[in-house]
Image (cartoon, helix red, strand yellow):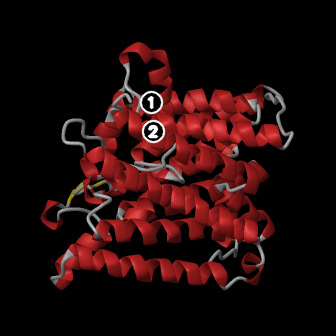
Amino acid sequence: MADFSAATLLAGCGLMAGLLVGVVARTARFCTFGAVEDWILADDTKRMRSWALAIAVAVTIVQLLDGAGVARIDQSFYLSPNFGWAGAIVGGLLFGFGMAMVGTCGYGTLIRMGGGDLRAVVVFLVLGLSAYMTARGFTGLFREALIEPLNLDLTDLDGQGLSHLLAGALGLKRAAVSYGLGALVPAAIAWWCFKDRGFRRAPRDILSGALIGLAVASGFAATGIIGADPFDPQRVESLSYVLPPGETIVYLLTFTGATVDFGVGLVLGTLCGAFLTAALKGELRLEAFDDAREMRRHLSGAFLMGFGGVSALGCTVGQGISGMATLSLSAPLALGSILLGAAFGLHYLVSGSLREAFSALHFTGRNPLG
């Protein structure tokens, strides 16, 4: 039997995780922007609670794996001592607003592509290329000049994780703190999720949240274990849909001289899972832009998602679940900013006025914690 490299094995793991995400999202309508829409327009928080449950499941497993020294999340960029608070806030706001302009997030774009949405194909290309440019190209100059100089150096704490902070403050071993956080934080989130009667009566939302959380945890487990190959080390990561689309585009363009990895496998797997589910449900249909105005909105939104997502070091999944699973300091900043930007963008789309969007955001009266 042929020996596979660590990168190839991780691409297979990403493919399997992506298939799961694609099937779950297409079947159960698991969507961040959809959750924001339900909350703001219908005062329905079931999908928001499903998203929170995914975070709780991911935190539980990842923190247990971290305490056991298996996941190696301390080597991921999420827990880097370089604390990018400004990027998390500014990038998150831009990503959230762009998400509202497009009508979905990064992985939601792949879910729509799987059903035959040609608008999503355009968004995927613009999002992927703008993200790649922001990470390694021209627009990255703006990120390096305006955002990264504001980063805080937390080298003395060995990282920016909540476990690092508490371990240092209490004089405890970080493994013990990880075990404690892996129990307390998910318990608090789960309590908020299940205190709502409507959510308790929504088995589809409960199951989808649990499965997405499991997929995120499996990503950290795979890259933490398989990626520890001393001869072919791989970065520790999990589900994210900002830079991986760009890396997938580059991989497809430079196939003979490129190396497949977890992110590429994840993107292709998610697309395949969504396509297979849409085909089985009879939901395959071609959709295109209604007019030039809609196309401009999608193009601008996709660019903001690419630039903002890389600046924030993740998207609704990359920071919103994967980052939150590591309990990094930047994750709640990025996730809160994304949700705020999305809510503002949604109000702007409804009212057509920036002033009214600001007013609606201030006086909305909606409380997702209720």
Instruction: Decide if residue 39 is in sight here.
Output: no
Q: Nearer the viewer, residue 76 or 131?
A: 76
Q: On the image, which quarter does residue 197 sit in?
A: bottom right
Mark 1 residue type:
Glu
Q: Residues within 10 Å of mark 1 (few under 14, many from 20)?
A: many
Q: Residue at x 58, y 69 (%)?
A: 52
Residue 236 in the image: above or below residue 337: above
Contact (Cβ within 8 Å) of mark 1 with mark 2: yes
Q: Residue furthest toward the left?
A: 156
Instruction: Compare residues 315 and 20 and report the one nearer the observer.
Output: 20
Q: Considering the numbered disc 2 on the image, is that residue within a helix, a strand or a loop?
A: helix
Report the residue at 67% width, 54% height from top: 31
Q: Residue furthest front?
A: 1
Q: Is residue 4 above or below residue 60?
A: above
Instruction: Write down the residue under mark 2.
Output: 263
**Left or right: 291, with 89 as reference point:** right
Give me the residue at 22% from left, 74% from top. Answer: 174
- Vertical arrangement, residue 261 with respect to residue 220, above or below: above
Query: Residue 18 or 91: which is nearer the viewer?
Result: 18
How far across and down, in percent of the image, does residue 147 sit? 33, 46
